[in-house]
Image: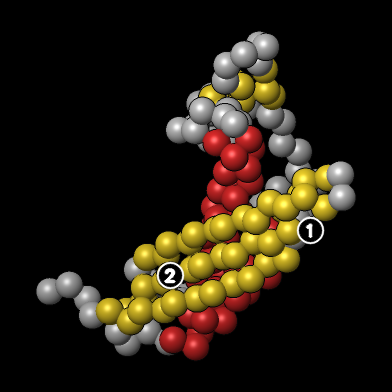
Amino acid sequence: MHPFPHHYTVSASAEPEGDVAVASAGLEPMRTAPPVEFDGPGGRWSPETLLCGALADCFVLTFRAIARATKLPWQSLEVEVVGTLEREGRDSRFTRFDIEARLRIPAEGDHEAADRALHKAEAGCLVSNSLTGQRFLTVAIEQVAAAA
């Protein structure tokens, strides 16, 4: 890992109507729009979905690093994040993030170690640690036999 601090530069550009172009050096640009809840067209990433996506992605990457470091065998991880946006006074803010992690481990895998790793990933995710909304983690661990 590179020494801290790390810097991430992203640009956004738009015209009075239409999508917002979001770009960062070396990455495919993406187009975003307001979500349906803000009278947007839907069908596009929005700042709100990008934030929840960043949290889900960070959780998975943090878990992957923890599993690698602890030599925890696993087969797949699916993470769903539901962010709750509320009006508080004159401001809108995310007040809650419900994180559901569904992990598949080998039948002979250590269920308790897997559970610890999932909770450690939630606690160590830099994106979730940067948010002020409450976080609630629900885990489901399935032990599955290897395919024959």
Q: How are the colours assigned in the image?
A: secondary structure
Residue marked by disc 2 = 102
Q: Residues within 10 Å of mark 1 (few under 14, many from 20)?
A: few
The amino acid marked with disc number 2 is Arg
Q: Residue at x 60, y 76 (%)?
A: 119
Q: Position of residue 24 (x, y in %)?
A: 62, 27
User: Which quadrant of the view contains residue 132?
Assistant: bottom right
* Residue at (83, 45) in percent of width and height: 91
- Residue 35 visible in the displayed image: yes
Farthest left residue in view: 148
Q: Residues within 10 Å of mark 2 (few under 14, many from 20)?
A: some
Instruction: Calculate the distance from the C-alpha at mark 2 to the C-alpha at mark 1.
Output: 24 Å
How many tags in the picture?
2
Type of amino acid under label 1:
Thr
Q: Secondary structure at mark 2?
A: strand
Q: Position of residue 104 (x, y in %)?
A: 36, 73
State the residue in front, 25 or 129: 129
Q: Which mark is residue 132?
A: 1
Q: Nearer the viewer, residue 107 or 83?
A: 83
Query: At which x and y percent is residue 89?
Result: 87, 50
Image point 32% across, 87% down: which residue? Answer: 108
- Report the side of 144 relative to 73 (left or right): left
From this viewpoint, is residue 58 visible? no
